[in-house]
Image (cartoon, helix red, strand yellow):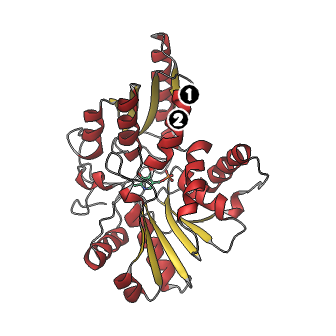
Amino acid sequence: MAVLPTPTHRLDRLSAELGIDLWIKRDDLTGFAFGGNKGRKLEYLLGDLLSRNVQAVVTCGSAQSNFVRQLGVACALFGLRCVADVMEHPYEPGRQPARSAPGRSDQEGNALLSRWAGVELRWHDDGPWDELFEHAQRSAESLKAEGLTVEEIPVGGSSPLGAYAFVQATREAQGFDHVVCPCSSGSTHAGLGYAFCGTPTKVVGIACDPEPELVDELARLSRGLDEIEGLAKRLGPDDFDLRTDSVGGGYGIPSDDGREAFELMLRTEGIFLDPVYSAKAFAGLIKMARRGELTGRTLFWHTGGLPSLFAPGAMWAVPVK
Ligand SMILES: *Cc1c(COP(=O)(O)O)cnc(C)c1O
């Protein structure tokens, strides 16, 4: 499915602009179902599902989830039924974002692409993530009641196997002093951080969810990686460098500095970022560069996500409170 390795190239004009030696990892070009980081995870996740003769999968996320889109296409290829419980903006309890609602739509962006792939989208009113997990659990139970072999896939494909895809990806990204990536469901950061831990390469994840507790999830995924790799790295939360200063108004809510980062990347290098993840991660990288933290060679991991540029209210033109 994924076309690997993805290109890794220097950003000459941005390097000059920011005064650092900046390179980019083009996982926006993984080549499968509009690209993005989930293509790497799905190589391993689908292999696992097929080896166990799973017939249907249930996952959940935001309606504009890139993972739902790519999982749905992968399921179509291999004849698996794919159900996704979605909310427009799931949130952490007590952290409901204030915003002007663009309205529910499955006619744009990832939601439309997911439907084209044959994903059964089950919509729910916005609520906390835990509520969404319960909906997914109920969907899985109903499919089991139909006699199907069902697997629940965690949000964003962030199982240890999903993280393992990013342990493998580090083979394509050797020789850097810093690697900066977005972090949301965690397996991208967990895999990169796990593989580079104990090497001269420092990995920094820029949080796209307002959750400093994400580091506990990274530690949990790394314990799963210990089992897959047969290693005893035993990484804890302190082994992961997660920055939460670029989240803005919350998960899925475009931020002002994300918009500046988006425009800088587009107008300097001709590369589009997405408003939910990669623009915020690049905004985080710019802050690090301005603080003088990025000496040596820096690699920005572009994780894709471009279909959400065409989602209702995804863009910065919509006023966000
Ligand atoms: C899912 C996603 C991320 C976050 O990766 P995680 O492994 O979930 O932390 C970043 N960028 C894009 C475009 C994504 O779709």
Please state the horizontal and vertical placement of residue 318, each as a whole percent of the image: 22, 59
Taking the image as shown, residue 178 lies to the left or right of residue 216, namely left
Q: Position of residue 139 (x, y in %)?
A: 45, 22
Q: Quadrant of the N terminus?
A: top left
The reply to whether residue 126 is in sight is no
From the viewer's side, name the closer residue of 199 and 211.
199
79 vs 104: above or below: above
Left or right of 118 on screen, residue 146:
right
The answer for how far apart the CA atoms under marks 2 and 1 are is: 6 Å
**Residue 55 on image: x %, y %:** 46, 21
Label disc, if present, on residue 51 of the rendered structure: 1
User: Which residue is painted at 26% across and 56% down in the image?
Assistant: 309
Residue 285 visible, this orientation: yes
Q: Secondary structure at mark 1?
A: helix
* Observer-nearest of 12 and 147: 12
- The label number, if any, that marks residue 222 in the structure image: none
Residue 288 placement, left or right of 116: right
Q: Residue at x 20, y 40 (%)?
A: 107
- For the point 56% across and 54% down, which residue is it? 166
Secondary element under disc 2, as helix, strand or loop, is: helix
Q: Residue at x 62, y 44 (%)?
A: 160
* In this view, 85 is above or below 188: above
Q: Is residue 140 above or below residue 44?
A: above
The three-letter code of the residue at mark 1 reads: Ser
Q: Are marks 2 and 1 in contact (CB under 8 Å)?
A: yes
269 up-or-down from 59: above or below: below
Q: Position of residue 237 (x, y in %)?
A: 69, 58
Circle 2 sits on which residue? 47
- Crowding near the residue tagged with mark 2, few <14, some 14–19, many ≥20 C-alpha atoms within 10 Å: few
Which quarter of the rendered picture does the C terminus lie within?
A: bottom left
Left/right of residue 208 with respect to residue 48 in the rendered view: left
